[in-house]
Each structure stands twice: as structure tokens, then as C-alpha cells.
Amino acid sequence: MTELGEFLRVRRAALQPADVGLRGYGARRVPGLRREELAMLAGVSATYYARLEQGLSANASEAVLESLARALELTPDERAHLHTLARTPTRHRPRSRPDVIRPGMLRLIESMPDTPAVVLGRRSEVLGWNALGHRLVAGHLPFAAPHRPAERPNMTRLLFLDAHTRELYRRRDEEAQRAVSSLRVLAGRSPEDDELTRLVGELTVQSAEFARLWARHPVANCVSGTKQLRHPEVGELEVAFEVLTPPDDAGHRLLLYTAEPGTPSAAALDLLRHSRTTCRTGMSPSVS
């Protein structure tokens, strides 16, 4: 079964007849709508839908995809993901060179010492961070690790496999759901990315929590929100995050954290910044 077929199957199984105005008759062998029911709701033949879900039919039209999205009651992010999965897959690319942060982006985040900033690559790997961003999300790791590909942290891997990072988030389930939902979006956009495929495989094998969430096919393009943290140096705080995407095809994302002015969380961030200044003077890395 293709990624498109699996996504359709999971979303179909999540809908009950009553959810879409149909009458259910007796017990069902499998949960959710039958293929025939979804095909009827979408206005396509049951045979065509079955082939689509089984991966036997490609290049579904925009009209068919929109009809399926309406029948499945997809969110805007899920609808966009459906269209992405339905694109003709490209061949796997050979293993590429490790990604690097642009010097201008690095200078930009270093020019904002009061705002925690992290630059992520197309697989959620950390390409760079400023001092406060590093101290906020991964102070237990070497500051220069993003600039050494063999040691480069990956935010999703840290969340599921690193004990320090797991303890950082007070709403652990919410953060895990958000991370997997974002990774699904990234995977849908780059089905030919072998490195990303290996990351998903590693996490599926090593984390039962990740495997369970991944199988549900959650999809959400998380570009803003709040995070509840329990930081080992400054205690509990709430930060808002914004994800900015440069207008090129590099796939990089700039992750910025802020706290509401005048709140204990803002005071905690300020304390963290001053602690970094007094305890880590001269520790700023140079990019190799």
C-alpha cells in the first residue's frame, strides 16, 4: 500500500457512518466507513476508490482529491497533505551532502541575543542556534554540535529518544503529537528523501510511542503555538513559538521563542540569558 493509500485508509477508519449522515446496520468487521460508503460520499466509483487506496491507480485528478477531502472531512493541513501524497513520486535521490546553514541566517540569529532561535533543516535537524536558543532547548549538548554533521542534533529524535529533552516538556503528549504531525508533513513533501526515511525507521523501531503516533497519520503544519517547559535551570515557563520559512527551496525553518512581557516566563528567559552571559563568556562557537 502506498502512503496515499494508507492515509486514505486511516482517515476512512476514523469516520463512523453517523459522522457523515449515514445509517449504520449492525456490527462492522472493521472500524469506520466502508470503501463503498466513502466512494458514494465522494461521488466516485467504488472500484476506482478501492484501486486508489490499494495503490493501483495513480494521478488522481484535483477534482477527485477535493471530493475525497470533503468526504473525509479533512482539515486544511490534511487536505494539502492529501494533494502532496497524490503527486507522482520521484525517484530516490542519492545520498546528498550534509546541509549547512547560510552564513546570513547564522548572523541573523546571533544578532538576536534576547530571543531564543533555532534553524532547522528539512528533516528537523538543527543547522544552527543562537546561545539562548541552545540554552533553552538543548543546553546539555555541545553548542557547536549543529556545525558537525556527525553530531548534529535532530529535534524529533531528541524528543523521543533523549531523556533530557523528554523531561523538558510539561505537556509531553501534546509535544509528541505535534512533532509527529509536523514530520508527516515533511515526509509527504519529500518521499524521495532516504535520510528522512531512515529517521522514521529508526524512531519507529526505538520508540513505541513514536510508532503508535506515526501509524495514526496525524498531519498538521505547526507554525505557531505555545510550549509548556520545565527547564532544568530556570524552572517552569511558557513560551510562544513561531516558525518562519525562507522564500527559497532549501527547506530550512527558523524557529523563534518568546515570552509574554512582564510574566514569570519572561523573567525566567531573562535569567537564562544572564546566566549564559556570566557562566559561558567566550563559549560562542565558530562555524567550520
Image (spheres, rainbow, N blue to C red):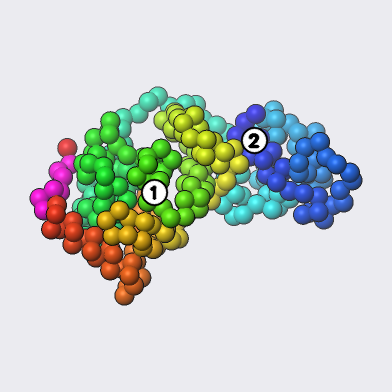
- Residue 96 image-quadrant placement: top left
Q: Position of residue 21 (x, y in %)?
A: 82, 55
In this image, 242 relative to 5: left or right? Answer: left
Q: Is 166 contained in the magenta span? A: no
* Tag of residue 186: none
Magenta segment's dominant SS is loop
In this orientation, which residue lies closer to the viewer: 171 or 93? 171
Q: Quarter holding the C terminus?
A: top left
Residue where numbered disc 1 is placed: 167
From this view, report whether residue 201 is shown above or below residue 112: above
Numbered disc 1: secondary structure: helix
In this image, 201 relative to 20: left or right? Answer: left
In this image, 151 relative to 224: left or right? Answer: left
Residue at (76, 33) in percent of width and height: 50
Residue where numbered disc 2 is placed: 6
Q: Position of residue 59 (x, y in %)?
A: 64, 35
**Residue 240 appears in the picture as rendered:** yes
Residue at (31, 33) in percent of width and height: 98
In primary-sequence order, the first of circles 1 and 2 is 2
Q: Which residues are magenta?
A: 281-287
Name which residue type carries label 2.
Answer: Glu
From this view, report whether residue 226 is shown above or below residue 191: below
Residue at (57, 46) in percent of width and height: 218
Is disc 2 surrounded by few (<14), some (14 to 19) or many (20+) residues within 10 Å? some
Q: Position of residue 16 (x, y in %)?
A: 77, 49
- Residue 6 image-quadrant placement: top right
Name which residue type carries label 1.
Answer: Glu
Q: Position of residue 88 (x, y in %)?
A: 58, 33
In this orientation, which residue lies closer to the viewer: 92 or 228? 228
In this image, 59 relative to 209: left or right? Answer: right
From this view, report whether residue 114 is shown above or below residue 197: below
